[in-house]
Image (spheres, rainbow, N blue to C red):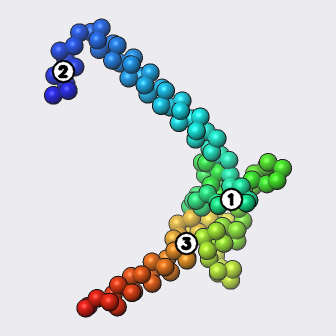
Amino acid sequence: NNERKLSSLGWAAKVFLHFYSFAFFAKKVEIFRKFFGKLHHSGSVLDEPSKTIKAGAHGVPGGENMLVLDDGSLRYYTVRESARIQTFPDDYLFHGSWTESMRQIGNAVPVKLAYIIGQSVAELINKSDI
């Protein structure tokens, strides 16, 4: 139906709609960049909640596996820092390189969240007639 409406328009109206659509899109991109550009490649601030720990290593966009130091510089989280953010116990050992360990941590469901979900599922199973 929309295709018929567009095909019945003259070329001038089509050109106008094309530029209007582009201008509308460009404005949305500008607003997006102004808001999210401040967050991109910024790392996590020490006294605030961490960004999501991602399963990548170096080159993770958005600074998710990084920490902003007091002097404004950035560094990558250690394996132990990442494990604590994901609520792994301190005695849990990760095997492999830093990259392999970060992949394991980034792919994991946070331990405390998994425990709470498991408790909820067990409670539902115990209450049911199964």
Residue under circle 1?
48
Q: Of tags 1 and 2, which is closer to the observer?
A: 1
Q: Quadrant of the N terminus?
A: top left
Can you tell which quarter of the image residue 75 is in? bottom right
Can residue 76 be seen here? The reply is: no
Can you tell which quarter of the image residue 38 is in? top right
Which residue sits at x=64%, y=68%? 85
Counting from the top left corner in percent of width and height, residue 52 is at 58, 59
The relative height of residue 2 versus residue 40 in the rendered view (above or below) is above
Q: CA distance from mark 1 to mark 2?
A: 52 Å
Residue under circle 2?
5
At label 2, counting other C-alpha atoms closer than 10 Å, the crowd grade (few under 14, some 14-19, many 20 or more) is few
At mark 3, the secondary structure is: loop
The relative height of residue 24 versus residue 77 in the rendered view (above or below) is above
Query: Mark 2 or 3 closer to N-term?
Result: 2
The relative height of residue 129 versus residue 96 in the rendered view (above or below) is below
At mark 2, the secondary structure is: helix
Residue under circle 3?
110
**Residue 57: which numbered mark, if any?**
none
Amino acid identity at mark 1? Glu
- Of residues 48 and 96, which is closer to you in this image? 48
The relative height of residue 9 versus residue 50 in the rendered view (above or below) is above
Q: CA distance from mark 2 to mark 3?
A: 52 Å
Which residue sits at x=73%, y=60%? 47
Which residue sits at x=60%, y=61%? 53
Q: Of tags 3 and 1, which is closer to the observer?
A: 1
At label 3, counting other C-alpha atoms closer than 10 Å, the crowd grade (few under 14, some 14-19, many 20 or more) is some
Amino acid identity at mark 2? Lys
